[in-house]
């Protein structure tokens, strides 16, 4: 099928993926950026159970798919529907970025062993300040196409794994090698990821001649040690952050759970969603795509056309955040630039085009005549 998800749906899904990634004033030292990943986190099951369920280890999206049996009214419910479902599970896989200092400068990191590195909170090299931080990379699990069958129900399980990894980025002191013919490496950024194991379970139940209830469960089955004493920050390294699902259908349409047609209202009320809120996404009145979001949305959410780019905080107004960023001190901007590439791009975008502020002020969506006034000439 390979349904093409529209641009509007992709924009909204990306905004959900990075909601709360880093908040104003966009510096690691800011209090609000010391506990992150507050939306859509799916922790390892053992850790969740050790926390008595205060952290989810699985989510469930339950939606309705309406199709057409292609036969006359009253046909037997065993007639197959040509309805195909496609599911993409997306999340952030966290990366621990540690700053390491070398006791003795080297020309190549290959010369170093583990004992040569000393982990430090920050390292200043010339005018550059490097500090520990958590980054993230996008992960996606593409579930094979599922044909909604003609039977009473079906279940399919799709396990997934993303392995652990580590990489070192050399930190070069460009002034250290003067007189030696080359620059010297005085430290490194060590980026580490923990292994993540999970499972997507899809269940479909035919509850009418042309109506299916589809359930999508995303579970974190990563094996983690010492769950009782494991701190949340370490547990998140094994977690699925900002996890959500994009569901697309061909040969049928999704039913709004927020405003269902009267004939489907009871079935919509019986849908059970855990940790996510499924809404229709795309152009108004399209029903081919649904987003199971970890943050509460209405049907057909959209990014305002005046927004010039990500600010990672959907509860704020772009104009206010832009003004605040422009008012940061030089020292605050320096920390912002060096903390995170995505935060740096926010600052560069605003500094390169300050005129965009005018586009954010007072947008008019529609004009209607005032009540009680005629439209004709006097």
Image (tube, grey):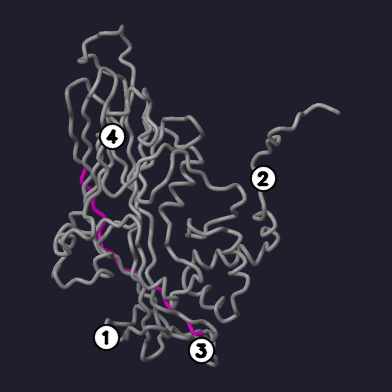
Residue 229 image position (x, y, % from top left) = 16, 73
Residue designated by label 3: 177
Mark with earlier residue (3, 4)? 3
Residue 2 image position (x, y, % from top left) = 39, 33
Secondary structure of the residue carrying tag 4 is: helix
Foreground disc of the pair 1, 3: 1
The residue positioned 61% from the left and 60% from the top of the image is 319
Do tag 2 and tag 1 residues touch (Cβ < 8 Å)? no
118 or 235, nearer to the observer? 235
Residue 371 painted magenta: no
What span is colored magenta in the figure?
A: 158-173
Cα–Cα span, label 4 and label 2: 36 Å
Rate crowding at label 3 as few (under 14), some (14 to 19) or many (20 or more) other CA atoms within 10 Å: some
Residue designated by label 1: 115
- Is 222 placed left or right of 351 in the picture? left
Cα–Cα span, label 4 and label 1: 60 Å
Cα–Cα span, label 1 and label 3: 23 Å
Foreground disc of the pair 3, 4: 4
Mark with earlier residue (4, 1)? 1
């Amino acid at each position: 099928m390979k349904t093409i998800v529209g641009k509007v749906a992709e924009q909204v899904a990306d905004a959900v993926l990075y909601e709360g990634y880093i908040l104003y004033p966009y510096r690691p030292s800011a209090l609000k950026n010391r506990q992150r990943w507050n939306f859509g986190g799916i922790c390892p099951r053992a850790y969740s159970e050790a926390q008595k369920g205060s952290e989810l280890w699985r989510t469930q999206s339950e939606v309705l798919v309406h199709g057409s049996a292609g036969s006359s009214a009253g046909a037997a419910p065993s007639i197959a529907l040509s309805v195909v479902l496609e599911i993409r599970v997306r999340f952030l896989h966290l990366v621990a970025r540690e700053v390491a200092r070398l006791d003795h400068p080297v020309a190549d990191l290959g010369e170093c062993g583990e004992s040569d590195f000393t982990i430090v909170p920050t390292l200043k090299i010339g005018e550059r300040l490097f500090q520990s931080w958590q980054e993230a990379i996008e992960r996606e699990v593409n579930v094979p196409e599922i044909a909604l069958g003609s039977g009473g129900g079906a279940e399919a399980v799709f396990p997934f794994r993303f392995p652990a990894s580590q990489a070192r980025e050399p930190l070069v002191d460009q002034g250290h090698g003067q007189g030696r013919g080359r620059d010297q490496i005085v430290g490194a950024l060590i980026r580490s990821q923990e292994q993540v194991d999970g499972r997507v379970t899809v269940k479909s139940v035919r509850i009418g001649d042309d109506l299916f209830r589809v359930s999508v469960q995303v579970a974190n089955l990563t094996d983690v040690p010492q769950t009782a004493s494991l701190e949340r920050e370490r547990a998140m390294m094994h977690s699925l952050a900002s996890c959500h699902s994009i569901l697309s259908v061909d040969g049928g349409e999704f039913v709004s759970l927020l405003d269902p047609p009267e004939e489907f209202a009871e079935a919509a009320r019986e849908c059970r969603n855990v940790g996510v809120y499924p809404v229709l996404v795309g152009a108004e009145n399209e029903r081919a795509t649904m987003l199971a979001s970890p943050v509460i949305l209405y049907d057909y959410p959209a990014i305002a056309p005046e927004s010039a780019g990500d600010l990672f905080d959907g509860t704020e107004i772009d104009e206010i955040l832009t003004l605040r960023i422009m008012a940061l001190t030089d020292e605050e901007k320096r920390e912002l630039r060096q903390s995170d590439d995505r935060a740096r791009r926010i600052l560069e975008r605003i500094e390169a085009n300050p005129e965009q502020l005018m586009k954010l002020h007072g947008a008019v969506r529609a004009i209607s005549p005032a009540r009680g006034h005629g439209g004709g000439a006097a």
